[in-house]
Amino acid sequence: MFALTKPNTGTPTITEVALAAGVSRATVSRTFSRPELLTSETIERVRAAAAQLGYVPNPVARALSTGRAHNIALIVPDIANPFFPPLIRAAQARADEASYAVFLGDSDEKPEREDVLLTKIAAQVDGFILASPRLDEHRIRAHAARRPLILINRDLEGLPRALMDVDVGITQAITHLAELGHRRIAYVSGPPASWANQQRQKAAVKAAKRLGLTLMGIAALHPTYQSGQKAATKLLNTDITATIAFDDLVAQGVMAGLADRGLQIPRDMSVVGFDDVLAARTYPPLTTVAAHCAELGVRAVELLVEILENGRNEAPRIVIPTKLVVRATTSKPAKLPSARRKSLTAAS
Amino acid sequence: MFALTKPNTGTPTITEVALAAGVSRATVSRTFSRPELLTSETIERVRAAAAQLGYVPNPVARALSTGRAHNIALIVPDIANPFFPPLIRAAQARADEASYAVFLGDSDEKPEREDVLLTKIAAQVDGFILASPRLDEHRIRAHAARRPLILINRDLEGLPRALMDVDVGITQAITHLAELGHRRIAYVSGPPASWANQQRQKAAVKAAKRLGLTLMGIAALHPTYQSGQKAATKLLNTDITATIAFDDLVAQGVMAGLADRGLQIPRDMSVVGFDDVLAARTYPPLTTVAAHCAELGVRAVELLVEILENGRNEAPRIVIPTKLVVRATTSKPAKLPSARRKSLTAAS
DNA sequence: TTGTATGCGTTATCAT
DNA sequence: ATGATAACGCATACAA
């Protein structure tokens, strides 16, 4: 008996199955990759032997041989931002259905780290899904040149992408507010460099203009609860009666900031969020523009898989509509907003 | 000139670098894996050639050769449960520092899917981190027998694990309530089969007993907002004055359910959450037991990396203490809780 | 339909 | 300190 060159890890290989089934290694390989080339008889025999030994094709060896790892990478700026978990979850589930495992990368809102992550993971995946609001366009294109890459919420010509159609929802929201009688509205913005923010702001401006409303912009640099709280203070000494926030998180912060000053929502200020990721769980439940982020993730995966399996070479641009969901944070404006608010802030 | 057997993918390989640098492939390999064996001179020359060509060692080939993929898997029951995003985020960041890429698996709260995921990813990772409250113990052990596996919030003898020490925090919470004057408390439980829930319930019972308080159990089968809302109705016709919920999400649901019936928090009912994942963002801000879930993730990764790199063979049991964070949902109980509450529910 | 032989890109063993 | 060469486990072109 001769010593093995490398200590066997315990995982059975194709060779042992071949031996057990009395066929060649190629036949075992075909049983799992191209069974249509084989007799159902031999397939069965090999399958049996494999099951017996607990054999499973080694994806690493397979990847080296074929150049396809059957993995995909999903890169997001911040897992903890409530917008992403539903997206990640849905994307992961869809990838799983298509037999792809997913690498998760959190770029930590630092675009340069995305770069590192991407190149490091690149060799192990067949393609990327990138939700990066701010990474340099030419860097993205450089990555896309190496592997198929799907963009989420970023509209770069020539690259396949899944986008939210912000327009519909924002227009509905502003129309809703206008119908309630609001004339002066604030948009509490997110990160200025973010595509999503630009879209939302643009849509809000357009809709407000068309309806003859005044729209005031308030900056909340980071899309966080704290930013929303801070932004709330800027709303205080104005005659604004309704606020649209960059996202639900910011809206939640605005609500808290307002409540801290003794304002009641929606009596003293109507608030509209965006995304519908935590809107149903705020109190009062937040009126918001639903973004269907789960579907965004699913479609991105489908796009990628389609490209990988059928080698499509176009750059589809999938647009998923948004939709206003009216809950309990919007109502008619109070009669004398400015007077009331001044007394309140004086008291605080 | 001869045709290449396979169309070159464009990624330079070790051979081309060797050629360019005028050394053997082995030397190139050593430059990136064991540079201490080489002259700084040759290292430099190889590095230059590699940079020139844009060469990066192929992790797949490396994995096949060494049997180590430098990947880890992180399996959670539900990415969208707010407990996990901070944990995932922190774990990913820590793994990244140690040069490990992470596969993310969402078992969708269905233990049998965890199994599929695990075996499918197994060959591509050096180890697992498993946050699975309900997967069969012997299945877990079977997986652990193949690869290093770290458990999160699950206390299985002989396996390395990172746990929350629920006791401290729960005891603090109940003591806090007792000091405020509460005598009758409810524990709104999570999934009965979940280790975390069992720990929390047990700790609550123990602490209540010691302080001579009455503790009533109310079941919220799923750890969701909706379950909390439903559970709130069961609190209505009781003389309970304070509630501890399985987690923040359930607590948030309880708060909403109570508020819907016109109860004010904390005046009419004190509420305590668990995890501190969204407690700071509720309104009013939720008193909760902070679980430091980010640290849980970090420590799990460190445990795994330690085992992978230094081949430790023990099964450390890391315990991370919890701590009460008092915010605004707890106060002294009202004088006549039962009477007031009856009139309110009658009105609703 | 099945077997043989070779390559995928790297590391590891054994020389030199 | 460096080079030649055999694995690693699988897929595939070519033969039969």
Image: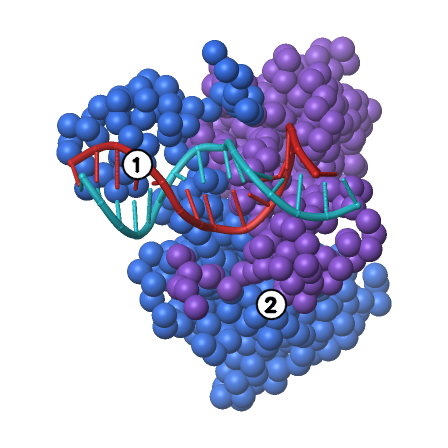
Chain colours: A purple, B blue, C cyan, D red
The disc placed on residue B235 is none
* Above or below: residue B21 compared with residue B25: above
Could you tell whether A158 is left or right of A78 in the image?
A: right
Q: Which residue is mark 1?
A: B26
Please name the residue shown 72% across and 37% down the image: A298
Marks 2 and 1, the one that precedes in the sequence = 1
For disc 1, the neighbor class at 10 Å (few under 14, some 14 to 19, many from 20) is few
Tell me: A99 left or right of B53.
right
> Dot 2, how many residues are within 10 Å of its Cα: few (below 14), some (14-19), or many (20+)?
many
Give residue A293's quadrant in the image: top right
Q: Chain of mark 2?
A: B
Name the element at disc 1. helix
Kindly identify which residue carries mark 2: B133
**Which quadrant would the N terminus of chain A be assigned to in this image?**
bottom left
Residue A71 visible in the snapshot: no
Q: How far from the left and from the top, in percent, is residue B135?
A: 63, 68
Give the letter of the chain under mark 1.
B
The residue sitting at 78% across, 58% down in the picture is A44
Q: Is residue A172 visible?
A: yes
